[in-house]
Image: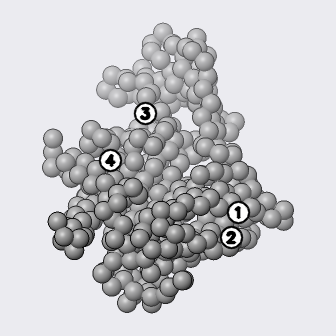
Amino acid sequence: MKPTIRRWTTTGLALLVGAVAFINNLEKLSAAPCDGVPLCETQVMTPVHYWSWQTSGWAYYCSGDHPYYWNNGQSTLGFGNNFTWDNSCFSVTENPFAEDASKMDATITNWCIHRGGEDITVTLGCSQQPQAGPSCPNNNTQVVFHDVKCPMQGSPQNHCAPGTFPVCYETWTEQCSDGPAYCTADQGAVWCVICGQ
Amino acid sequence: MSPKCMTSIMAGALCAVVFAPSVSAERPLYDTKRVLEHLGNECGQVPACQSVQSLPVLLNPDQVKVIAVDCPSSNPFVWHWDTRQHEHIHVKVVGRTRGALTLSASNLGDASGSAQIFIGCSREPFTVAGTGLMTSRLGVPSKGRKLEKEHGHRSER
């Protein structure tokens, strides 16, 4: 294949990808970050400025008393879930394999060509309940703001954002007579997620 | 599987292929004269922020360089970062301490290019809550796209 033909074939592929990603994004603009996430609140991230046709990797974190980011997996690979953004110039492609209990990881691209670039603000759906939390009948989960003091299963685990950030929390599981309780200690607050009665 | 699922999978998989830095077919598609300007994101929402910049680093094709930038003792905590760089330079974070960032810059194009790093430094310790972390910056290949008409085309070389 001649270099020119190969170049334009690859360019066409890139444009196709952009179009697919853009259409995909339009769908997600109408979804709410807390769709399908129990005990959820939205957390708005700081706006970021992008140059035209710039792509960046980003890691965003749920924090405070709602430290858990859920990935509800609208596909089996988990692309595009409990987050939204405010500018249709952008595609936001989730990297589910780089995520953890609090972290949302994405590749963000500005496809518009506007003088001075574009701003984007990402919003996460953040939960008090870990995604691997209790599975209760009728999804009747309940949060109590104290340690239920049932026998502990295993050892407590510390979770910190990478690096030197002061964002850490501790989790542990207790086995109560009516089911497991998933507990979290975060910045002095303690709460447990249990099945409702 | 629903069409929405298929679209999501296709978008993610194809983007992964297109943006994979090692795809040599992309090499001639970069406009190696286009510059992604410095936008000041290193100090966005950072309390009492001081911007600290590295010297510009020149990279030949396929060359990779590591750049470390430190905050001064007056503003010892590093927050965010930004760059002024050519489209075909892939800059990414490789290390972080309380007061410094270490980044790598890789030349993915077929011509030399440059990158200059800007970090935001504060008296207050960094918190990831509500701000997140940029992990990399790169241009989308734009050769022949006429983006220069919008921004004014400048070459650093």
The mark found on residue B69 in the picture is: 1
Asked which secondary structure carries label 3, the reply is loop
Q: Which image quadrant: the C terminus of chain A?
A: top left
Asked which secondary structure carries label 2, the reply is loop
The count of marks equals: 4
Say if residue A101 shows up in the picture: yes
* Circle 2 crowding by C-alpha within 10 Å: few under 14, some 14–19, many from 20: some
Relative to B124, say whether A138 is above or below: above
Evaluate if marks 1 and 2 touch, with contact meaning CB atoms under 8 Å apart: yes
The amino acid type found where label 3 is placed reads Gln
Same subunit under labels 3 and 2? no
* Circle 4 crowding by C-alpha within 10 Å: few under 14, some 14–19, many from 20: many
The residue at which mark 2 appears reads as B54
Q: CA distance from mark 4 to mark 2?
A: 36 Å
Front label number (3 vs 2): 2
Disc 4: host chain: A
Say which residue appears at 31% left-offset and 59% top-offset: B18
Same subunit under labels 4 and 3? yes
The residue at which mark 3 appears reads as A131
Evaluate if marks 4 and 3 touch, with contact meaning CB atoms under 8 Å apart: no
Residue A145 locus on image (x, y percent): 59, 31
The residue at which mark 4 appears reads as A79
